[in-house]
Amino acid sequence: MINDAIKQLQFVSDTIIELLQQVDNELLHKRPIANKMSVWEVCVHLSQIPGADLHIQKKYSKEQMMEYYQTHRLDTIENVIAHFLEGIQELIFYYKALSKEEVERQFKTYWGSEYSMAEWFIQIINHLVHHRSQLYQYLLLLNREVQIVLFR
């Protein structure tokens, strides 16, 4: 199951990279939908998800997560892409090393929800897909020609 999920994660991350590469300086601070994240904020959030969600699964506290977000501030789209790729590789390496028993092990998040490691991995992919769709829609709303296959 985990190997199949990793294949999906790799596809999703490849498409996120394609979208991130279409973001230029002209778009970065646009906010296509009032009271929602800007293009830049979505890009940064996407770059933080793999590492952050891995830390949550490792039982980081709310305070440790706040520190993670504060210390991973990025200043260019190139740094966003590099940070995203680093997090994806760390996530894949971590999950590939888990035994079947570890994948089934339960853990509790800092906000009190309980997940198995496998279920959390699905949540991470869902989180990435959600924000990938958000960035995709933003690009379309900003009249960018987006030619990308989001599902195969």
Image (cartoon, rainbow, N blue to C red):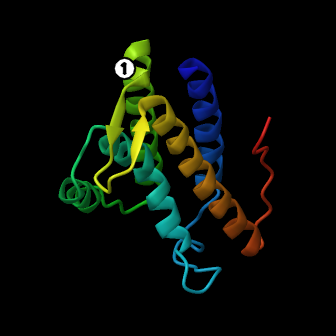
Does residue 98 appear in this view? no
87 shown above or below 102: below
Number of marks drawn: 1
Which residue: 80% across, 34% down? 152
The residue to which callout 1 is attached is: 102
Q: Secondary structure at mark 1?
A: helix
Badge 1 local density, few (<14 within 10 Å), some, or many (20+)?
A: few
Q: In this image, 104 relative to 142: left or right? A: left
- Residue 121 in the image: state x and y as whole percent: 49, 35
Which residue: 63% across, 62% down? 135
Which residue: 52% across, 74% down? 37
Residue 74 lies in quadrant: bottom left
- Residue 85 in the image: state x and y as whole percent: 46, 39
146 shown above or below 28: above
Q: In this image, 122 relative to 116: left or right? A: right
Which residue: 54% across, 85% down? 35
Quadrant location, the N terminus: top right
Type of amino acid under label 1: Glu
Residue extending farthest bottom: 34
- Residue 122 in the image: state x and y as whole percent: 55, 38
- Residue 112 in the image: state x and y as whole percent: 32, 53
Q: Nearer the viewer, residue 132 or 114?
A: 114
Residue 111 lies in quadrant: bottom left
133 shown above or below 103: below
Q: Nearer the viewer, residue 44 or 105?
A: 105
Does residue 132 appear in this view? yes
